Amino acid sequence: MKLFATTDISASVHKAHEDFTHVVVNRGFTLHKPIIFDSRALLDLPLNQHTPFIKESAGQVDRWRAKGGVLIEQSPYLGWECDVTVMVECPFEPKRIDKVMQCTQEYGVIPNPVSWAVYDEYVDLHTPITEHLEEIWRVCAGRQMSNSELADESGWPLSQVQYMKKVFNPKEHWYIQKRLAPEREEMLPAWDWLEGGCVPRSVVSEAGHRSMVEEMGRFGYVALRKLWHYPSETPNWRALRKAREAALKDLAAVRSLVDSLDDHLQT
């Protein structure tokens, strides 16, 4: 299965649809600053859409299989048996390309980024330099802190530290104080479920009340403060250093691959 690069996703999808019956557009995004592809550029084509957590969208897949056309896949890692797969985001690791393209019969198309700067930034945020992590760890070890507090005390910008801290696997807890019962009926189940105090965010999510609790916090029905509980055990700095090296290696491999590909629209 051959791969091509493109700088015009819409044009590549149209070209693939002209030549083949079953085309998949992988519209999943994984970058922290994704360049969102506007699917309205494809409205002249026979479109179907699949979203894994929406059961009803399975019928769209059946219709696409039977009649052909373009299937827009929202999952960043899900591939389908098809003629052509066009990705709307260039991945930062080879395994995502392999996963998405594994059932593609004819060829795959990968966007050639205008700039790789956002990819370098992604690696720095999700697999940071160990020395930078050590600076943050000296502040947060064994503590309960908000992102803003961590940024203020560590000296790192909030926009960066909110990603970098994730390597420590802190657990998010919500500190909730009930104030005034809401008048909006859609909020009442969440209000009745809440007991106040410290609640793990995961528990609120599993109960299905996350969005409503946040909404009540915005409108002042509850006082809501989000804190992250950091472990006290020292991180495995060697493992974190190796994870960064692997991420840099993956990104270099993807960049080398994309730079070597023929332009899909020129073939």
Image: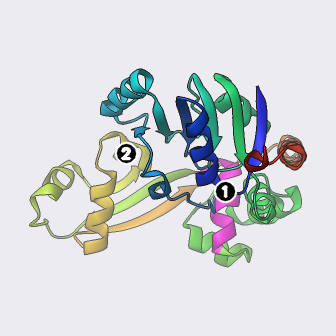
Tell me, for residue 122, which label it has, or none.
Answer: none
Q: Which residue is mark 2?
A: 205
Q: Is residue 174 left or right of residue 10?
A: left
Return the x and y of residue 40 as percentages of the image width and height. Answer: 44, 57
Q: How many marks?
A: 2
Q: Nearer the viewer, residue 229 or 151?
A: 151
- Disc 2 and disc 1 in contact, CB within 8 angstroms: no
Q: Quadrant of the C terminus?
A: top right
Residue position marked by numbered label 1 in the rendering: 8
Mark 1 neighbour density, 10 Å: few (under 14) some (14–19) many (20 or more): some
The crowding category of the residue bearing disc 2, from other C-alpha atoms within 10 Å (few below 14, some 14 to 19, many at least 20), is few
In the rendered image of this protein, does residue 24 appear above or below residue 184?
A: above
Determine the image quadrant of residue 105.
Answer: top right
Q: Secondary structure at mark 2?
A: helix
Where disc 1 sits, the SS reads: loop
Q: Residue at x 63, y 59 (%)?
A: 32
Of 160 and 78, the residue lying toward us = 78
Residue 159 forms part of the magenta stretch: yes
Please name the predominant secondary structure of the magenta segment in the image. Answer: helix
Q: Amino acid at mark 2?
A: Ser
Q: Report x, y in % for residue 61.
A: 41, 28
Three-letter residue code for mark 1: Asp
Task: Note whether 5 is above or below 97 in the view shown.
Answer: below
Q: Position of residue 36 (x, y in %)?
A: 56, 60
Residue at (65, 50) in percent of width and height:
89
Q: In the figure, is residue 171 to the left or right of 233?
A: left
Task: Magenta stretch: give its range.
Answer: 158-170
Regarding residue 91, the answer to whether it shows in the image is no
Q: Earlier in the sequence, mark 2 or mark 1?
A: 1
Between circles 2 and 1, the one closer to the viewer is 1
**In this view, 65 is above or below 30:** above
Q: CA–CA distance between discs 2 and 1? A: 38 Å
